[in-house]
Image (tube, helix red, strand yellow):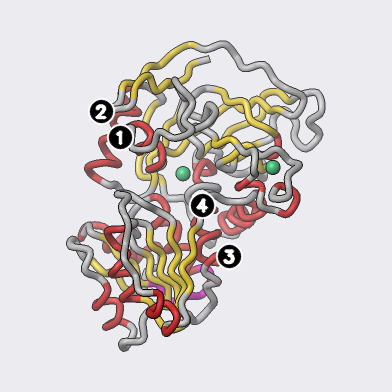
Amino acid sequence: MKALVLEAPGDPPRLALRTLPHPSLGPHDVLVKVSACGVCYHDILVMRGTLRRGVKPQVVLGHEIAGTVEEVGQLVFSLAPGDKVVSILTEPCGWCLRCTTGREHRCIRGLGIGHGGDGGFAEYVKLHELALVRLPPEVDTVEASLLACPLGVALHALRDAGGLKAGETALITGAGGGVGTHAVQVARALGARVLAETTSPHKEGALRSLGADQVLVTPDLAFGDLALAFTEEVGCDVVLNLIGTEAFGECWKALAQFGRLVLVGELGGGSVSLAPAEVIFRDARIIGVSGVSRAQVADSVRLVQGGRIRPVIAQRLPLSVEGALEAYRLLTQERPLGRVVLVP
Ligand SMILES: [Zn+2]
Ligand SMILES: [Zn+2]
């Protein structure tokens, strides 16, 4: 089978399309024929060498995988050949406390797909059955690659971590990106008023059509005062920071009393300074979110099936060195609307 191997991280990274033997299956493993794999900013950080900890040498990247079951291990009864599936971001053990309490995406022994183990930038990928969620037969498996990360992550962040309710106001920063375009739709589907922040003026129309009530175009990331102006100085009940440290201060400025600041993305690293008294007197919560559980992915599937959300694919590129390098260029320079996917 063909697989795209990260030979050496760098800017640009050194990648090679190799022919690897078909993986052999353990009793709980499933072989998935990949229909598409989304290119996440996580993949870019590993490609560039910014993120090195726990990365398998010569890794096959990609954790946003959807496809069709080709073959199952001896003890797999949850899936059968021909089933359409989407993966979560981690291979869970199935036995630890987190796995048995619905938090398998943070399994104590979990292996990051396309990070600690090989992922979906390949024709086939071997995954534990508990890393997969079965899809309805009518689902498009290219679009379905976005149902865990980024859509499920957005649902996790806004509904479950942020507790966003109908009638509240949500501010989505970095709204034009992979997670952002889906977060805008999730916030809308939850019945919230949606402020969408973007640095790209040309994304305004698209963000409105995805459900943004107001689009804040702020190339300098100075969106805090604008968000206050749009909310009669009240601020936003949930602020989703998809940018990281660089946007933290403005996110904090935009947060309402009793507000929830949810941190998902970190593009730059570094640290922030914040007086604990400010958190206390604002009755605020600051919550980190990573990954998505199988139950949250199942909810994402229902939202898409019900027509309330549509996966936003920016571009489909071939699974090749050229395709992956073009994805790298798009994500680091052009920042297209939605997600770029690689199609074998
Ligand atoms: Zn991702
Ligand atoms: Zn576990």
Q: Is residue 106 left or right of residue 261?
A: right
User: Is residue 213 among what the camera can see?
Assistant: yes
Residue 328 numbered mark, or none:
1
Residue 12 numbered mark, or none:
2
Q: Is residue 107 above or below residue 226?
A: above
The kind of secondary structure element at disc 3 is helix
Task: State yes or no: discs 2 and 3 in contact (Cβ < 8 Å).
Answer: no
Q: Residue at x 33, y 37 (%)?
A: 50
Which of these two is toward me, 338 or 255?
255
Q: Which residue is mark 4?
A: 290
- Kind of residue at disc 2: Pro
The kind of secondary structure element at disc 1 is helix
Which of these two is toward me, 322 or 286?
286
Q: CA distance from mark 4 to mark 1?
A: 22 Å
Residue range (magenta): 189-194
Q: Residue at x 25, y 30 (%)?
A: 11
